[in-house]
Amino acid sequence: MTRTALIPQFLIAGESVSRVGAERIALLEAVRDHGSISAAGRAVGLSYKAAWDGVAALNNLFSAPLVVAQPGGRHGGGASLTPEGERVIAAFHLIEAELSRAMAALEADLAAKGVPGASHLLRSLAMKTSARNALRGVVDVVTPGAVNAEVLLHLADGVKLAVVITNESARTLGLAPGVEATALIKSSFVLLAPADAVGRISARNRLYGTVIRREDGAVNSEFVLDIGGGKTVAAIVTKESAHDLGLNPGDAACALVKASHVILAVE
């Protein structure tokens, strides 16, 4: 199974909205190295205005200015760091280094206790997606075809999800047995049926479970199924369909998902 390194990032924040992270520190270092704000902006990929705005935000954030400059238009005037600016850069890198050492020690301590690493615990919290269903699992099998590959993702004991993606996507994502991946499924792509009335259907995935929540809106209804192993699947259907299904909390149901309607993501 692959491991993902967790790299701590340090931010300096004041009462204003501005924040100082690695990008702003890089701008300070570029001012120091190039002697002008416009040249520093070019060095770090910022426009003239963005570089000046960044320097102004830095100076506003601290009690003493970090940069002193003589405006010279777009062709650049002189600029240099103050002693306070030099101290901020040094302190930032020192704190980052200490955080990295602390994180490495934490990872080692957790591993010694048989607890999943901090990277494993935190990366699940960090993912943001518009898909209602984000199910983390481990790749069991990758079966390549002429154009597409079928990926079988182990979600929990007895719960597997088949996903069809292109061979190129499988290679790009580095998918192989043991690799962790997250399946993203829009709730509107999930079909529902009572567990005893699935019948014949072309959907590759049949996730059996129990309805644990139903919320009816003006037009649609949302169902949430417990499919086992602490995993749940949400489905959105029309209110009329929900009435026809007659499913309520406690009822056995089946979530049907086409393999081609699943998106895979890796860290």
Image (tube, helix red, strand yellow):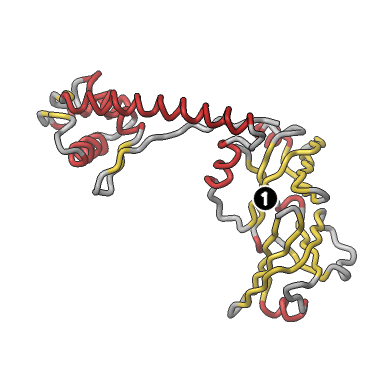
> Where does the image place residue 227, in percent across and percent down from the top left?
76, 58
Q: Amino acid at mark 1?
A: Leu
Residue in view at x 80 percent, y 64 percent: 254
Q: Is residue 189 above or below residue 152?
A: below
Name the residue: 64% across, 37% down. Answer: 115
Left or right: 43 as drawn, with respect to 114? left
Quadrant where the C terminus is found in the figure: top right
| Residue 136 coordinates in the image, percent (x, y) | 67, 46
Location of the N terminus (image quadrant): top right
Label 1: few (<14), some or many (≥20) within 10 Å?
many
- Pick out the residue farthest to the front: 113
Q: Nearer the viewer, residue 262 or 125?
A: 125
Q: Which residue is mark 1?
A: 135
> Residue 211 occupies which quadrant of the picture?
bottom right
Q: Is residue 46 above or below residue 264?
A: above
The kind of secondary structure element at disc 1 is strand
Q: Quadrant of residue 45?
A: top left
Residue 114: image x %, image y %? 67, 34
Q: Left or right: where does residue 245 sit relative to residue 67?
A: right
Looking at the image, the residue that sits furthest to the left is 70
Residue 147 position, x and y percent, is: 77, 38
> How many labels sit on residues?
1
Front-most of residues 96 and 40: 96
